[in-house]
Structure formats: structure tokens, C-alpha cells
């Protein structure tokens, strides 16, 4: 059978020594009260001590200050208010700076777009005029956007069916075209080859239309390099095959339009020949194609 745990402690009441200790504390309290009543307090030194302590524990350099008849207030509260006002003013200033920065970026983007269009348009106008003078105005169309000028040549003027070799009649066209393009030898030039969607016959030397389109683009690049002395470092042949048709492949006329070669001439900025900062200081006149000379 489990035993009940004995209760700790004896009878009630405090130990006898606590009575003696309480009497001693009362006597010490009376003694210090008597000493204080007979002493005199230097009010000026007291205020200096309080001000010094307040200054030491304040979160700001100004510390606390004593006003009227010894009533002390800490300047921390007022300084916190000043800090909040300062933070608010800084936030407003930073917001205004961010808005100004965003507006500046938008303005610069608009400026860049305008400079690109002006530069590309000037190139397009110069090329179109040169093609008209060379008799190719009806055979080659000229278009431009923000970054480059596009010359579109009907593939039937250059190549036979399933062939990437220039025809005899195409040699004259390619020669006149090269005379125009050589003025832009320093510019980045991309030559895109396109085909219709008809599959190649078994007699073709090309695997498919993608290879055929690359062969045609590469033929144009090689002709310009070998016969017109253009820099192949700035020219890139690109195969597009039957992608991006400009007409329906359901008709012979549409397929003829899709079998084409496009030459893209990037403007001076896109080609890295001129910076927008230079334009801002020197001004773009619109006839800056002399950078190739």
C-alpha cells in the first residue's frame, strides 16, 4: 500500500531572526531620514547632474534640456518628430528623383528610336535612288524599319528552279546590286534565302528547301565578296526555307513571290559605326552614309 508523502515544514509563523532584522532596517531608515533633514541640496549642481544623465542616455546629440523650475524634458521626442519629418522629405525627394529618372529613360528611348528611323530612312532613300539610276528600281523593292533597310529580290531573277547558281541574266543584276551595296561595306549586312513549300525532286543536290535557301543566300554573299571586294566579316547568309511566306503557296504566282532573296542593311547605330552620344553632340544630318567612305 502506497504511503502518503509527509508535509514539509513545521508549525506556522516566521523565524525569530526576522524580527531582529526588521527592527534593524527601521532604525537605518530613520537614521538616513535624519541625515537628509539636516543636509542642504545644491540645486544648480543637481540640475547639471540630471542634464548630464539625460544627455548621456538621449538617442540624439542634443540630449535633454531643463526648463522652468527644474522641470526636465528630454529632447528625444522632439528629435524623433524632426527625424520623421526629415525621412518624409527624403522619401518625397527620392520619389521625385525616380520619376525624373523614368522620364529621362523614356525620353532617351524616344530619342534613340527617332535617330534610328532617321538614319535608316536616309539609307533607304539613298539606296532607292541608286537602284533607280542603275535600272533596278522595278526589280528590287526597298523597305525600312527602325534598324535596317530591306531589299527584296524575286528569286526567279537570280536562280533556276532547285538551283543555287546565278543564271547568266542574274549576273548583271547582282553586279549592279553590288555596286550599290559596296558603299555600305562597313555596315552589318544579312542575306536571307527563301523558297516556296514545294518539296525538292530526287535530282536536286540539296537535301531540302532549308539547304536550298542557304545555298542561294551564300551564293549572293560569295559573289559580293569575290567580285565586289566586300568584307565577308560584316556579311551573314541566313537560311529561312519556306518560312515567312509573303504570298500563298497555293498559286504559281504566290510561290514565285515566296522564292526570294532579302538583303538587310543595318543602320549605322545597329552596325556599331556611330553612337547616340556622338549624334547628340555632333548632330545627325540625315546624309550620314558617308561613314562608309
Image (cartoon, grey):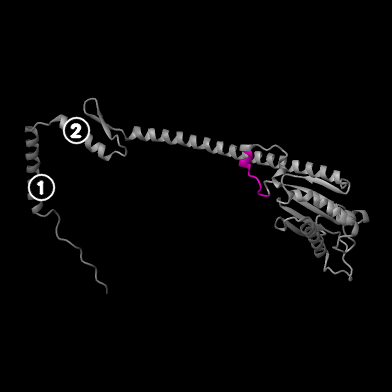
Which of the two residues, 114 or 229, is positioned nearer the viewer here?
A: 229
Which of the two residues, 212 or 56, is positioned nearer the viewer here?
A: 212
The label on residue 22 is: 1
Q: Position of residue 14 (x, y in %)?
A: 13, 53
Q: Is residue 276 magenta?
A: yes
Which of the two residues, 80 or 212, is positioned nearer the viewer here?
A: 212
Q: Secondary structure at mark 1?
A: helix
Q: Is 134 drawn above or below residue 230 in the view shown?
A: above
Q: Position of residue 77 (x, y in %)?
A: 34, 34
Q: Is 254 drawn above or below residue 81 in the view shown?
A: below
The crowding category of the residue bearing disc 1, from other C-alpha atoms within 10 Å (few below 14, some 14 to 19, many at least 20), is few
The answer to whether the residue labelled 2 contacts the one labelled 1, judged by CB atoms less than 8 Å apart, is: no
For disc 2, the marked residue is 48
Rendered residue at 9%/31% (across/down): 40
Rendered residue at 56%/38% (across/down): 101
Q: Secondary structure at mark 2?
A: helix
Q: Position of residue 230 (x, y in %)?
A: 75, 55
51 sits left or right of 139 in the view? left
Which of the two residues, 77 or 160, is positioned nearer the viewer here?
A: 160
Quadrant of the image occupied by residue 99: top right
Residue at the limit of the structure toward the bottom, as seen here: 1
Quadrant of the image occupied by residue 115: top right
Residue at the limit of the structure toward the right, as seen here: 252
What segment carries the magenta color? 271-280
Amino acid at each position: 500500500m502506497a504511503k502518503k508523502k509527509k508535509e514539509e515544514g513545521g508549525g506556522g509563523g516566521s523565524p525569530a531572526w526576522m524580527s531582529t532584522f526588521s527592527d534593524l532596517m527601521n532604525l537605518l531608515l530613520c537614521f538616513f531620514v535624519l541625515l537628509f533633514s539636516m543636509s542642504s541640496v545644491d540645486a544648480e549642481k543637481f540640475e547639471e547632474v540630471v542634464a548630464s544623465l539625460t544627455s548621456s542616455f538621449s538617442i540624439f546629440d542634443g540630449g535633454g534640456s531643463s526648463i522652468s523650475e527644474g522641470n526636465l524634458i528630454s529632447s528625444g521626442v522632439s528629435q524623433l518628430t524632426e527625424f520623421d519629418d526629415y525621412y518624409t522629405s527624403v522619401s518625397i525627394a527620392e520619389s521625385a528623383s525616380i520619376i525624373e529618372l523614368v522620364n529621362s529613360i523614356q525620353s532617351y528611348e524616344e530619342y534613340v528610336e527617332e535617330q534610328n528611323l532617321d538614319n535608316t530612312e536616309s539609307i533607304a532613300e539613298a539606296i532607292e535612288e541608286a537602284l533607280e539610276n542603275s535600272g533596278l528600281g522595278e526589280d528590287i523593292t526597298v523597305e525600312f524599319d527602325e534598324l535596317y533597310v530591306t531589299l527584296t529580290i524575286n528569286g526567279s531573277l537570280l536562280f533556276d528552279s532547285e538551283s543555287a547558281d546565278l543564271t547568266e541574266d542574274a549576273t548583271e543584276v547582282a553586279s549592279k546590286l553590288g555596286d550599290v551595296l559596296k558603299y555600305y561595306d562597313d555596315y552589318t549586312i544579312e542575306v536571307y534565302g527563301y523558297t516556296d513549300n514545294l518539296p525538292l525532286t530526287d535530282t536536286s543536290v540539296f537535301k531540302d528547301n532549308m539547304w536550298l535557301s542557304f545555298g542561294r543566300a551564300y551564293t549572293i554573299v560569295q559573289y559580293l565578296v569575290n567580285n565586289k571586294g566586300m568584307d565577308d566579316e560584316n556579311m551573314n547568309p541566313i537560311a529561312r526555307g519556306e518560312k515567312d511566306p509573303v504570298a500563298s503557296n497555293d498559286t504559281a504566282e504566290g510561290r514565285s513571290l515566296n522564292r526570294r532573296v532579302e538583303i538587310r542593311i543595318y543602320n549605322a547605330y545597329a552596325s556599331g559605326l556611330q553612337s547616340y552620344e556622338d549624334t547628340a553632340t555632333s548632330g545627325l544630318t540625315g546624309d550620314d552614309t558617308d561613314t562608309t567612305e
